[in-house]
Image (cartoon, rainbow, N blue to C red):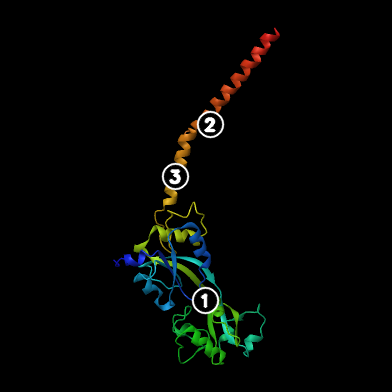
């Protein structure tokens, strides 16, 4: 069992971590519209994001896989396309922006594999020929690309984050997907975490609270929403007098019968007046 997060840190509000390339502004705005609890953004390094969550430096984080399913719950928020970052004078730079590079095109290219790479776990997974040295960061790798030393495959958001005038990028057809996930320590699932899950999934203010998240690839947890749904249906049944045997339909018939009887009485009365 993991140690609980520091209560003094939690007292400052809800802390949402995020890794480079992720833009949480939309969800922060919705949170601020719905909550009095302040939300603080905490920048995290990709390689340290999981450890920072365990240490309690953030209550949840927008990060990238892999994550240990025995420790974390996670839902995929969106999936980015991979791109190849090349120098402006590289042959691939002459391609149109809508013309992708294929994995086969990279077979004879020198590929950079920074230590904070988020797409390739090992150098053997890289397309092309792996460079002998690994740059410390993606930013350092982009500098080497600009110098014409190699190419780099990253999610599109990171290519935009590290944009320079002397480099450009093209889509990589057949490259690895780049999912972004909302993750948190499973043992620390709180109402605020579940509310944030509802926000990133697009739920309305009336439906986001109390719905327990179903982590990607995991078993469904007991959800408060289905229980609430049954309660509402049950309340409707009692109010409307409807039973499983269709008694509500009979109630409508009785009500209709009274109406028709009343109408018939009026017709009979008018007939007596004419008589």
Task: Estimate how packed mark 1 is, as few (under 14), some (14 to 19) or many (20 or more) residues with alpha carbons within 10 Å.
Answer: some
Q: Residue at 51% of width from left, 32% of height from top?
A: 248
Earlier-in-chain disc, 3 versus 2: 3
Residue assigned mark 1: 176
Tell me the distance, in whole angstroms, between the alpha carbons under discs 2 and 1: 57 Å
Residue 108 visible here = no
Tell which of 21 and 238 is nearer to you.
21
Whole-percent x, y for residue 20 in the image: 48, 76
Q: Residue at 66% of width from left, 9% of height from top?
A: 272
Q: Are marks 1 and 3 in contact (CB under 8 Å)?
A: no
Disc 1 secondary structure class = loop
Residue assigned mark 2: 249
Whole-percent x, y for residue 126 in the image: 50, 84
Tell me the distance, in whole angstroms, between the alpha carbons under discs 1 and 3: 42 Å
Earlier-in-chain disc, 2 versus 1: 1
Q: Indicate whether 126 appears above or below 60.
A: below
Whole-percent x, y for residue 130 in the image: 49, 89
Tell me the distance, in whole angstroms, between the alpha carbons under discs 3 and 2: 21 Å
Nearest to viewer (mark 3 / mark 2)? 3
Q: Residue at 65% of width from left, 79% of height from top?
A: 97
Residue 259 visible here = yes
Image quadrant where residue 264 sits: top right
Disc 3 secondary structure class = helix
Query: Which quadrant of the figure contains the N terminus?
Result: bottom left
Residue 82 appears left or right of 122? right
Tag of residue 230: 3
């Amino acid at each position: 069992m993991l140690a609980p997060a520091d209560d003094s840190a939690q007292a400052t509000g809800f802390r949402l971590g995020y890794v480079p390339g992720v833009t949480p502004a939309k969800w922060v705005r919705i949170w601020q519209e719905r909550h009095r609890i302040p939300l603080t953004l905490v920048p995290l390094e990709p390689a340290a994001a999981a450890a920072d969550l365990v240490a309690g430096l953030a209550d949840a984080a927008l990060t990238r896989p892999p994550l240990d399913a025995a420790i974390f719950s996670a839902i995929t928020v969106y999936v980015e396309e991979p791109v190849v970052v090349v120098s402006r004078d590289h042959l691939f730079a002459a391609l149109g922006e809508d013309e992708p590079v294929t994995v086969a095109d990279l077979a004879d290219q020198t590929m950079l594999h920074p230590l904070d790479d988020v797409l390739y776990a090992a150098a053997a997974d890289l397309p092309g020929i792996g460079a002998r040295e690994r740059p410390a960061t993606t930013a350092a790798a982009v500098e080497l690309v600009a110098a014409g030393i190699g190419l780099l495959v990253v999610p599109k958001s990171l290519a935009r984050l590290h944009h320079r005038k002397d480099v450009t990028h093209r889509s990589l057809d057949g490259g690895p997907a780049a999912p972004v996930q909302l993750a948190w320590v499973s043992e620390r699932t709180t109402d605020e975490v579940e509310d944030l899950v509802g926000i990133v999934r697009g739920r309305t203010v009336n439906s986001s609270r109390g719905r327990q998240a179903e982590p990607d690839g995991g078993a469904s947890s007991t959800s408060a929403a289905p229980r609430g749904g049954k309660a509402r249906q049950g309340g409707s049944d009692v109010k409307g007098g409807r039973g499983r045997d269709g008694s509500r339909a009979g109630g409508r018939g009785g009500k209709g019968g009274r109406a028709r009887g009343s109408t018939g009485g009026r017709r009979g009365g008018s007939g007596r007046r004419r008589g």
